[in-house]
Amino acid sequence: MFAPIRPQRMTPATLLRLTITIVLVLAIAGCSSAKLAYRYADWGTVWWMENYVSLTGAQQQALEQGVRDFRQWHCSRELPRYERWLSTIIADANSALLTNSARMEFHQEQLLALLPAITERATPMVVAFLKTLSDEQVQELAANMADRQQELEQDLLKRSPEATASARAERTAERLESWLGDFSDDQYFRIQRWSAAQAGQTDIWLEGRERWQQVFLEALQQRQQAEFASVISDLLQNPEQARGLAYQQTMAQSKNAMANLLSDLLAMGGEPALEQVKVKAAELKSDVDVLTCPLSTV
């Protein structure tokens, strides 16, 4: 829940996920990056998009305007929900409720509950953009998506299971320490046990990613048809369905395992860890408080 999401190269299909990433960084990243990510979301979206498909001037302008409109809506309508969520985190840190795995799962659900309104609002923008793609752009996009998939497979599957688990544990510890403080040997061993239990998830994630992309690219071939909007809406708002049952089951298990890990680490860290969470959440809430909504251009 507390680990920052790191930006990746984006495709038009994942524009919505980029938007969500920008939004979620307000709840899971450091204060300065939260401000910058939110205020420069317009420029960042187009920059990432151009890594995957060459945009025309008209497409770039339309995309920039769409993201600005979305950010205006999100800033005025959704940011108060993040403030309330962070306030609850602070209150639960004060009362040590975060050491309870069920309460940690509650906070996961609260965070995920912020997504439906975001996806529904952003989907028409994504659909409209995808409809403007030419056949050549679709071919370019498909080639770049295939290249990226191959890069991920080569990078993520080249290690032994033991090396993968070790790298996962180290990466997770680094991300969580800013929220929970320095870990003891016992806490780090708990992270290692959690990481070892996630064996096989990388393969399932890659397979699910590829399945989703195949369905998406097939839909793009029908982008001028009446049913295109509903197909893309379903892919964006219910992506797990296209990724398959194995992916859905793995993600559910992963979410539960992460809630248990976080609550255990807080319980093992005691008062200093809870105080660190409270301080970080308060800093982030302060950043959300001072974010100003851009003036509407409409």
Image (cartoon, grey):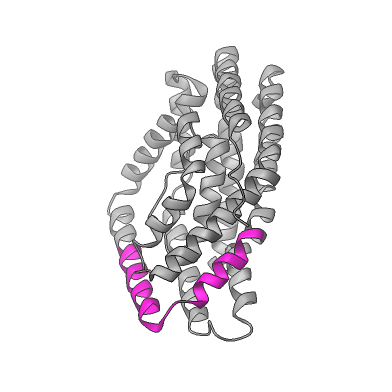
**Magenta stretch: residue 123 in it?**
yes
When asked about the image quadrant of residue 210, the answer is: bottom left
Count of numbered circles on the image: 0
Q: Is residue 43 above or below residue 37?
A: below
Q: In the rendered view, does 206 fall on the left or right side of 287?
A: left
Q: Position of residue 139 (x, y in %)?
A: 36, 79
Q: Quadrant of the C terminus?
A: bottom right
Q: In the rendered view, does 200 fall on the left or right side of 106?
A: left
Q: Residue at x 60, y 46 (%)?
A: 295
Considering depth in this image, is 293 or 171 the residue closer to the camera?
Answer: 293
Can residue 16 be seen in this snapshot? no
Q: Position of residue 149 (x, y in %)?
A: 35, 64
Q: Residue at x 47, y 42 (%)?
A: 37
Q: Which residues are magenta?
A: 121-150
Q: Quadrant of the N terminus?
A: top right
**Magenta stretch: residue 71 in it?**
no
Can residue 87 be seen in this snapshot? yes
Q: Is residue 136 above or below residue 98?
A: below
Q: Position of residue 249 (x, y in %)?
A: 59, 57
Q: Main secondary structure of the magenta part?
A: helix
Q: Residue at x 35, y 38 (%)?
A: 166
Considering depth in this image, is 291 or 94 the residue closer to the camera?
Answer: 291
Considering depth in this image, is 101 or 219 the residue closer to the camera?
Answer: 219
Considering depth in this image, is 149 or 90 the residue closer to the camera?
Answer: 90
Q: Residue at x 46, y 58 (%)?
A: 205
